[in-house]
Image (cartoon, rainbow, N blue to C red):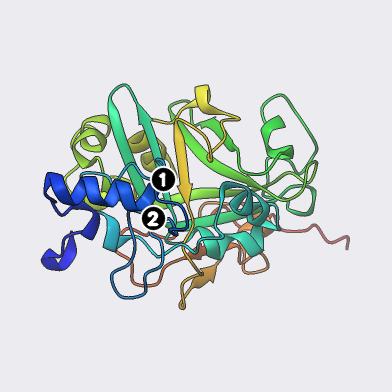
Amino acid sequence: MRGGSRCPCSTRRSRTARRSARHAHRSPGTAARSPCRHPATGRRLELAGFGHGRGPPRSGLCYRRRVIEDSGTREDIRTRLGGSALDVAPWLLGAHLTHQDDDGRVTVRISEVEAYLGPDDPGSHAFRGRTARNATMFGPAGHLYVYFTYGMHYCANIVCGSDGRAMGLLLRAGEIVEGADLARARRNQPASDLDLARGPARLAQALGVDRRFDGADVLADPFRLVLPGEPPAAISRGPRVGVSGVAGTGEYPWRFWLPQDPTVSRYRPGRPPAARKVDP
């Protein structure tokens, strides 16, 4: 953990202190407190949503997460994801997505996303309507849309918007903040940890996500999504990476990222729009 600080939840307590705390928690008329609260503000810290009262992850990520208000329940998060992808995008910057399987647990702090808006977006897989491949994009919100690309990679999106609208946010890049050893093994030991999830295919691979998880709920096991208490104060936006035609131009500045974050992927333009033929 940065700065050498320890999470207050991980401080060892004596057996007597633990027994007293349990007794106080169960006493009638005593307000129950979260076992993990910010030491300055007293507000609850959400730790990857792995269960109230079960303590923080061993990696000591408490202070690396943003404080989540007590109103940030699972259904509150799903309601927020039900907005337009353009409105939801800032909330995903700095959010933590966790996947736990038999191999272990990996958490990524999201630093870059791209919005896709279905029938209103020529760059979207759903621009021409529903297919077997893109059916998950049509809702409900809060589920993964995972697709296979270039014959070798998987990419993951979080579905947004109301049912039937086919909106989503591509998880383009992030920082692995938990389970780095497992992420390195999945990524075949990249030269730098900054590259573990820099790019959508790398991110999905580091998390262990493939087409088996298409349609999986990010707010239920084996996934956990934790949103920040508020969007970042500074956000950059611009054209999407590698999108061909007009959808990859400044007319669609639907790529959002954390400025100066070292895990953000490099911009690569797509093919330029085809030249229009002009009759003589």
The residue to which callout 1 is attached is: 52
Q: Is residue 144 above or below residue 245?
A: above
Q: Residue at x 46, y 36 (%)?
A: 223
Q: Is residue 206 left or right of residue 233?
A: left
Residue furthest out toward the front: 28
Taking depth in this image into account, of 3 and 132 the one nearest to the observer is 3
Instruction: Where is residue 244? Give x, y as percent.
Output: 61, 51
Q: Is residue 177 left or right of residue 218?
A: left
Taking depth in this image into account, of 92 and 211 the one nearest to the observer is 92
Residue furthest out toward the bottom: 233
The amino acid pointed to by label 1 is His
In which quadrant is the N terminus drawn?
A: bottom left
Whether residue 269 appears in this view of the structure is: no
The residue to which callout 2 is attached is: 34
Mark 1 and mark 2: span between their CA atoms?
7 Å
Instruction: Where is residue 90? Give x, y as percent.
Output: 54, 65
Q: Is residue 79 left or right of residue 279?
A: left
Q: Is residue 217 left or right of residue 260?
A: right
CB contact under 8 Å: marks 1 and 2: yes
- Of marks 1 and 2, which one's residue comes earlier in the chain? 2
The amino acid pointed to by label 2 is Ser
Instruction: Where is residue 162? Give x, y as percent.
Output: 77, 48
Using the image, tell me which numbered label, if any, was put on residue 277: none
| Helix, strand or loop for disc 2 | loop
Question: Where, by quadrant of the figure, is residue 188 drawn?
Answer: top left
